[in-house]
Amino acid sequence: MSFDRSPIEGQAAAPAWPSAIRLDRSAGMLELDWDGRSAALSQRVLRRSCRCSECESRRRRLGDVLPVAADVMLEKAEPVGIAGLQLFFSDGHSRGIYPWAYLRQIAFGPAVEELGEALTKGWRDE
């Protein structure tokens, strides 16, 4: 799947979404390309990084990385307009929308200091 990165009317710069998105089910990875750089995000890291209200609540209660079963698979990724991706996991979880900026931070490291350590702990644990 690929996206047209031409500017939206009235918008000066190209949007912050990737130029290519690939779901490699056999490797368990979501592959994203931004500005000539590629990143492969594991389905487990993506599931642990969900920011929906249910996952945020569990993360705060536990004070740690969300527990995710080892066999959880990323089944589908659907664009949600220019906002980001909705990810669908085999454990039935599909509530979270992953904004493009958040996916980019997971892929290439936090670019914004406001992200708490609880959100970034699980990103590079694979």
Image (cartoon, rainbow, N blue to C red):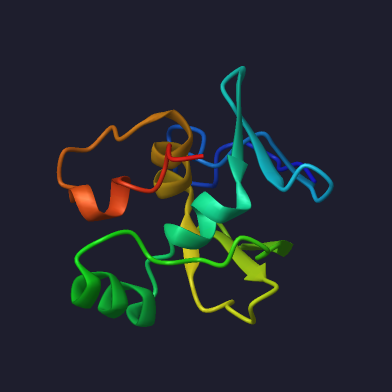
> In this orientation, which residue lies closer to the viewer: 35 or 61?
61
Q: Position of residue 12 (x, y in %)?
A: 43, 34
User: Residue shown at 61%/60% (left/top)?
Assistant: 70
Q: How many marks?
A: 0
User: Residue shown at 50%/50% (left/top)?
Assistant: 45
Compared to 38, does 72 lie above or below? below
Furthest-top residue in this view: 36
Q: Position of residue 66 (x, y in %)?
A: 38, 65
Asked whether, in this view, residue 118 is left or right of residue 44, the answer is: left
Asked whether, in this view, residue 7 is left or right of residue 76, the answer is: left
User: Residue shown at 29%/53% (left/top)?
Assistant: 119
Question: Which quarter of the figure has residue 109?
Answer: top left
Q: Position of residue 116 (x, y in %)?
A: 18, 51
> In this orientation, which residue lies closer to the viewer: 5 or 26?
26
Furthest-front residue in this view: 70
Furthest-right residue in this view: 26
Question: Which quarter of the figure has residue 6?
Answer: top right
Asked whether, in this view, residue 110 is left or right of residue 14, the answer is: left
> In this orientation, which residue lies closer to the viewer: 44 or 80?
44
Q: Position of residue 44 (x, y in %)?
A: 56, 54
User: Residue shown at 45%/32% (left/top)?
Assistant: 13
Question: Which quarter of the figure has residue 79?
Answer: bottom right
